[in-house]
Image: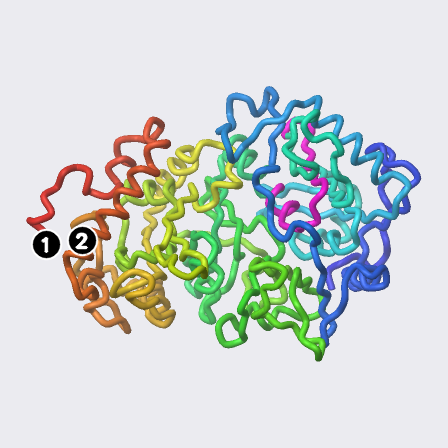
């Protein structure tokens, strides 16, 4: 499809201290799939799609992610449990170990780039131990043309050696044998000891989350994006399970991308990637038609279980809940090509509030938008153990804290400024519970959430009346096409109004507690965007 017809000359790998390697350069995906199956590293489903097992790690290992602490990073990075430092010396040692480990082996080299907007394009060369890791990069990064490969110079290098585990982690600043490390001075991402493909994807995403705001004045975002017939762009932020992928897949709008985007000073939105990496647990064609149909030869399934007939059992989580598929974006029919667009008009923050207190749709002021962006709230429904049915609030700054090297307020201020300059509307959408918390109320129907988003995209909420929520201060529309009006104010849906108020106060308190760690660097406008409750408003006036 998009790979060069002839094999361009394999680059000289001795510059990376890789000795006596048998290197395959820029192999087409079909060839990588064939090699994977021949080596017994994967098998094909009944329709010929590759399925692999990532081994010991079936997800990212955030505790084993490090940034090299040097002149570029030391005063810029928000150091802490998300961004852990490692010395340049330890990095150099681990890099030399990986180079020695890969030497003498058959390896796979792929040149690609990230950032679809030509002005921000960043070339990445990836060298992998496994053929399917290389095929993942074909799917997920942007695929260069023949001409672009002619004099390809990489800006970043990714070295991926799942089979190398550091035998003395303590000695070299690691927690255990596996690691994902970014070195901003050498522009190298090292992945050792883990075959989970998301480590490569999120490694480069983390690098862009530093480079773009610091050097290019671009806001990097963990969001999906689509564009309508009129050229209006919408962004969807949200943590896992809130509907980011589902809601951005809209038959009337073209998909720009499903996970990582930049917002430029010129007010355009571009995808960082050339593919999609979607969860497939409980996948059905009815729930997620686009993803379901994208799983065909060329896609790579991860950690799924087969039925006897060679089909995948998407309900089976024996290996992990985090079963996945990667595929090139052209497996989706309705896409924007190339993957960038102008004119961001609406931004949606998606949250799955299992406490059932947040309104299904509300409009945010600039201060509230920045506050909710820094908070990155959703609620996890507790595990399936008997007797545990209380939801747990979960906060991830900027809806992507594990990947953000800078302090969250840096991204929030950029968002706030861009939002105000571009006159963008920001909406908080609760895709969680209504009529009571998890266990009492019920999940808000997808058709209602879609109706709210469609009304917003069509400008139908521009002229309706809004009421302010007494506790969260959010502005709730009093009517919306295709949605029962009594749902729009969540208090109406609870049988016991007192229980609603006390549950709301409890969640408001969780927001305030979580925000304390950001407050010292947040502006007054942002702080005032939080719930009203701690400002000693008399609730009796409202209830």
Q: Residue at x 81, y 35 (%)?
A: 99
* Residue 214 position in % (x across, y down): 52, 31
Q: Residue at x 29, y 39 (%)?
A: 512
Q: Are marks 2 and 1 in contact (CB under 8 Å)?
A: yes
Between 55 and 416, the residue placed more toward the observer is 55
Q: Residue furthest front?
A: 387
Q: Disc 2 marks which residue? A: 501
Q: Residue at x 48, y 65 (%)?
A: 249
Q: The C terminus appears in which quarter of the rendering? A: bottom left
Magenta residue span: 184-203
Q: Earlier in the sequence, mark 2 or mark 1?
A: 2
* Residue 29 position in % (x across, y down): 76, 60
Q: Is residue 187 magenta?
A: yes
Between 111 and 104, the residue placed more toward the observer is 104
Q: Is residue 533 magenta?
A: no
Check disc 2: other Cα within 10 Å, few if <14, some if 14-19, many if 20+.
some
Q: Tag 2, which secondary structure?
A: helix
Q: Disc 1 marks which residue? A: 543
């Amino acid at each position: 499809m998009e790979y060069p017809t002839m094999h361009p000359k394999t680059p000289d790998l001795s510059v990376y201290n890789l000795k006596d390697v048998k290197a395959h350069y820029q192999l087409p995906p079909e060839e990588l799939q064939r090699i994977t199956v021949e080596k017994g590293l994967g098998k094909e489903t009944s329709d010929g799609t590759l399925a692999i097992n990532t081994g010991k790690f079936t997800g990212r290992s955030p505790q084993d992610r490090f940034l090299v602490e040097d002149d570029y990073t030391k005063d810029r990075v928000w150091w802490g449990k998300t961004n852990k430092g490692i010395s340049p010396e330890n990095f150099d040692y681990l890099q030399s170990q990986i180079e020695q480990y890969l030497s003498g082996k058959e390896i796979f080299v792929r040149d690609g780039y990230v950032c679809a907007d030509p002005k921000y394009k960043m070339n990445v060369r990836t060298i992998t131990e496994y053929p399917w890791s290389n095929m993942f990069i074909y799917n997920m990064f942007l695929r260069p043309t023949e001409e672009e490969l002619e004099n390809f110079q990489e800006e970043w290098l990714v070295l991926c050696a799942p089979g190398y585990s550091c035998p003395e982690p303590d000695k070299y600043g690691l927690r255990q044998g596996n690691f994902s490390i970014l070195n901003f001075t050498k522009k190298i991402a090292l992945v050792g000891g883990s075959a989970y493909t998301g480590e490569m994807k999120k490694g480069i995403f983390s690098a862009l989350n530093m480079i773009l705001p610091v050097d290019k004045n671009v806001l990097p975002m963990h969001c999906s994006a689509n564009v309508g017939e009129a050229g209006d762009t919408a962004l969807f932020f949200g943590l896992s399970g809130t509907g980011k992928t589902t809601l951005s897949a809209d038959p009337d709008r073209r998909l720009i991308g499903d996970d990582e985007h930049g917002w430029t000073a010129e007010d355009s939105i571009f995808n960082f990637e050339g593919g999609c990496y979607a969860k497939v647990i409980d996948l059905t064609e009815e729930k997620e038609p686009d993803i379901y149909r994208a799983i065909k030869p060329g896609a790579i399934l991860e950690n799924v279980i087969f039925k006897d007939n060679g089909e995948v059992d998407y309900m089976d989580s024996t290996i992990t809940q985090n079963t996945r598929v990667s595929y090139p974006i052209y497996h989706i029919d309705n896409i924007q090509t190339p993957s960038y667009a102008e004119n961001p008009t609406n931004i949606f923050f998606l949250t799955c509030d299992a406490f059932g207190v947040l309104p299904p749709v509300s409009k945010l002021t600039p201060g509230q938008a920045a506050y909710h962006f820094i908070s990155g709230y959703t609620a996890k429904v507790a595990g399936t153990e008997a007797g545990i049915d209380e939801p747990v609030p979960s906060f991830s700054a900027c809806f992507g804290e594990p990947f953000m090297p800078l302090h969250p307020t840096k991204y929030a201020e950029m968002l706030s400024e861009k939002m105000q300059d571009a006159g963008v509307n920001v909406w908080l959408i609760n895709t969680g519970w209504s009529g009571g918390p998890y266990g009492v109320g019920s999940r808000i129907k997808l058709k209602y959430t879609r109706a709210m988003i469609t009304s917003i995209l069509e400008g139908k909420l521009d002229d309706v009346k809004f009421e302010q929520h007494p506790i969260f201060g959010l502005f709730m529309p009093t009517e919306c096409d295709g949605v029962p009006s009594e749902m729009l104010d969540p208090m109406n849906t609870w049988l016991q109004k007192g229980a609603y108020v006390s549950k709301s106060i409890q969640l408001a308190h969780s927001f305030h507690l979580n925000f304390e760690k950001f407050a010292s660097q947040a502006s007054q406008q942002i702080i005032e965007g939080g719930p009203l409750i701690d400002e000693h408003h008399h609730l009796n006036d409202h209830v």
